[in-house]
Amino acid sequence: MTDTTILSPNLQRLRGFIADLTRLVEEHGDDEAAVLPAGRKLLAGLIATDDWLPDAYAQPDPVHYRQYLLHCDPYERFSVVSFVWGPGQRTPIHDHTVWGLVGVLRGAERSQRYDLQAQGGPPVAFPSEILDTGAVEAVSPRIGDVHAIANALPDRPSISIHVYGGNIGAIRRSVFDPLTGQRKPFISGYANSALPNLWDRSQPVPTAA
Ligand SMILES: [Fe+2]
């Protein structure tokens, strides 16, 4: 086995995850109560081994966290995104409007959930939670859709893999002012213009040493 083989990302793992998720949404459609627990298990399996994410989708930016699209279902039933957080980087308080799963692949993240007040005013914070490598968290309008996520490590990047019940970068959603609760519409987009090539299956499968 050459060094090149050892360093090549194991895209088979990502390809298998996407196939499993496709089967899941094919079977359960938008039945979130069925998709979330099964999707959580699949995502936990994907992030249990950190050998598959290509370096191009693991690069932090000096100023802003990055969101790289890894795959979008052709019917936009789900998308898979790698979020890369430099030290000190965080999201604003935001919603999703679709179900979402957050799984930490590398490092650790701080998750802060919020309740919006019906009469307006600042969003009410729940106690924050640390998500260590391997942890998976779910969000949705049904179970709680408003949160903020930050890198919990002061000195190095963290990376999480997110799965959403739609093409998340194209969905119109909201950020919220922490002091006033004022809602501002946003569409996140993606940092990348090219996707990982999951389909070059010409490389031989490495054999165990
Ligand atoms: Fe989020």
Image: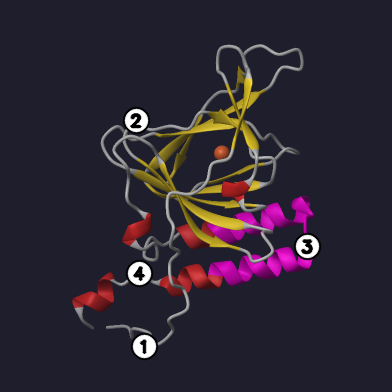
Q: What label sits on residue 9 in the rendered view? A: 4
Kindly state the secondary structure of the residue where label 3 is placed: helix
- The answer to which quarter of the image holds residue 25 is bottom right
Tell me, for residue 88, which label it has, or none.
2
Q: Residue at x 57, y 67 (%)?
A: 18
User: Is 99 positioned to the left or the right of 65 in the image?
Assistant: right
Question: Quarter of the image containing the C terminus?
Answer: bottom left
Between 72 and 87, the one lying in front of the other is 72
Is mark 3 in CB contact (under 8 Å) with mark 1? no
Would you say 12 lies left or right of 101 here? left
Question: Where in the image, quadrant-wise, is ligand 1 located?
Answer: top right
Element under label 1? loop
Amino acid type shown at disc 2: Gly
Question: What secondary structure characterizes most of the magenta part?
Answer: helix
Q: Report the magenta residues as a range.
A: 17-43
The secondary structure type at the circle numbered 2 is loop
Distance from the alpha carbon under mark 4 to that under mark 3 = 31 Å
Circle 2 residues within 10 Å: few <14, some 14–19, many ≥20: some
Residue lying furthest front: 193
The answer to if 19 sits in the magenta stretch is: yes
Residue 145, percent from left and from top: 66, 35
The residues bearing labels 4 and 2 have C-alpha atoms spaced at a distance of: 27 Å
Separation (CA) of disc 3 from disc 1: 34 Å
Q: Please tell me whether residue 20 is drawn above or below residue 177 in the rendered image.
A: below
What amino acid type should be assigned to the residue bearing mark 3? His
Whole-percent x, y for residue 163 in the image: 58, 53
Compute the Cα span from label 1 to label 2.
41 Å
Q: Residue at x 40, y 39 (%)?
A: 65
Please give the label number shown on residue 204.
Answer: 1
**Colouring scheme applied when the structure was drawn:** secondary structure
Residue on which the image places disc 3: 28
